[in-house]
Image (cartoon, rainbow, N blue to C red):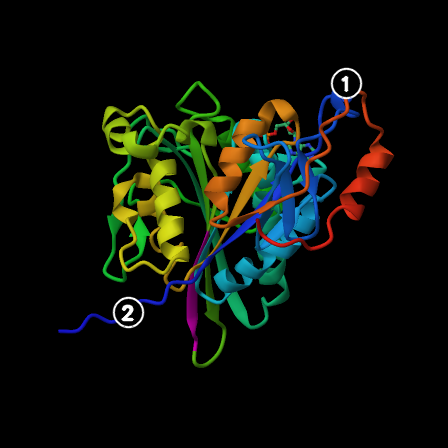
Amino acid sequence: MMKKAVNHSRVQVVVRLRPVLDEAEIDVEPCVRELDGNSLEIFNWRNNKETLKYRFDAFYGKSSSQEEVFESSVASLLVHTLNGQNASVFAYGATGTGKTHTMLGRPGDIGVIPRSVQKILSVAKSESATWKYSIQFSYLEIYQERVYDLLVPKNHDLQIREDRDRNIIIPSLAVKEITSYEQFQKYFIPASHNRYQLCISHYTKMFTLLVTKVQQAEPFRKLTGKLLLIDLAGSEDNKRTGNQGIRLKESGAINVSLFVLGQVVDALNQGLPRIPYRDSKLTRLLQDSLGGTAHACMVTNIAPEERNYMDTYTTLNFAAKSRQIVNKPFTRESTEKPSRVTLKRKASDEHRPSAPA
Ligand code: ADP
Ligand code: MG
């Protein structure tokens, strides 16, 4: 029997640069230069006469707002969830680069998770004359290939199953139904403080919104969609892969889920026939919400300070499957603090389109 080719949807890859946080560092030249809404460059540590230019589906600079990231990269995925399809958004990057800020945010400057909840609640309200909505969420943590419930802590690894319709489910995971934002906060805020792993950077948190809507009149259509919003473990856990990947994986020295996620995203974006979903807990949970007919976006977070350069470099190479070497030195000759005005001018002057090296 001939196997039908599966047309997997591509994973959108966007990058977000956080601003410099320390007042004392505000005038120090950053190691990332913003080019336009899709590209950025960093200096090439192997050759200081070159810069490395990367292009993504979108690039959000240091002044980008939570609203901008949500409206441009997440809102369109929500539409799919409301149409009975699955989607996922995950924040990738080293510790301190803004993953939690992007996904969770803070009071007054909320991120992707609370914005998605607000949006879905408001759509449900506006469509209430024609559709009856049920909105539920769950919240879990993955640490060392074990899955823990954050809503109702149970202290043991939860089993993952696949139902007859190929939905990935966790039968014993707590699920809360919500009809208002206040209700969401009541359950979510305490849960967001729960954790099984003490070291804050090593675990992945997965928030799932389940949306079911039933038509109020003939033909009573029923649509069920799922949106997975994921704050990944710090990608510094993912560095030591390379040739040693498999051995380290066996010894538990690397974050298996992050390692396999990279392989899954690559396989999807290269159109490979085999997608290794089953090789980690995270990708197993993502199986029905990443690739196939599901829509996904990886928000890659990076920091601007030079001391974070190696993390930035590794992260960008992980996220971008192609990059361009540009023969324009990053302005690094000066030992004097350059003023911000000159930096800005340089950024726009020097970067007319240039040929690949
Ligand atoms: P991560 O979750 O990747 O470890 P955080 O989200 O905790 O990183 O961000 C580290 C710090 O930087 C936090 O204090 C956070 O509030 C701040 N931060 C991150 N991104 C931004 C941003 N875009 N604008 C303002 N502050 C940010
Ligand atoms: Mg965090």
What residue is pinned by disc 2? 5
Where is residue 49, by image quadrant? top right
- Whole-percent x, y for residue 190 in the image: 52, 29
Determine the quadrant in which ligand 1 lies: top right
Q: Is residue 333 magenta?
A: no
Magenta span: 220-227
Q: Residue at x 30, y 48 (%)?
A: 277
Which mark is on residue 24? 1
Closer to the N terminus: mark 1 or mark 2? 2
Callout 1–callout 2 Cβ contact below 8 Å: no
Q: Residues within 10 Å of mark 2 (few under 14, many from 20)?
A: few
Give the farthest residue toward the bottom: 218
Q: Does the magenta stretch include residue 223?
A: yes
Magenta span dominant secondary structure: strand
Specify the quadrant that holds the N terminus: bottom left
- Whole-percent x, y for residue 115 in the image: 62, 48
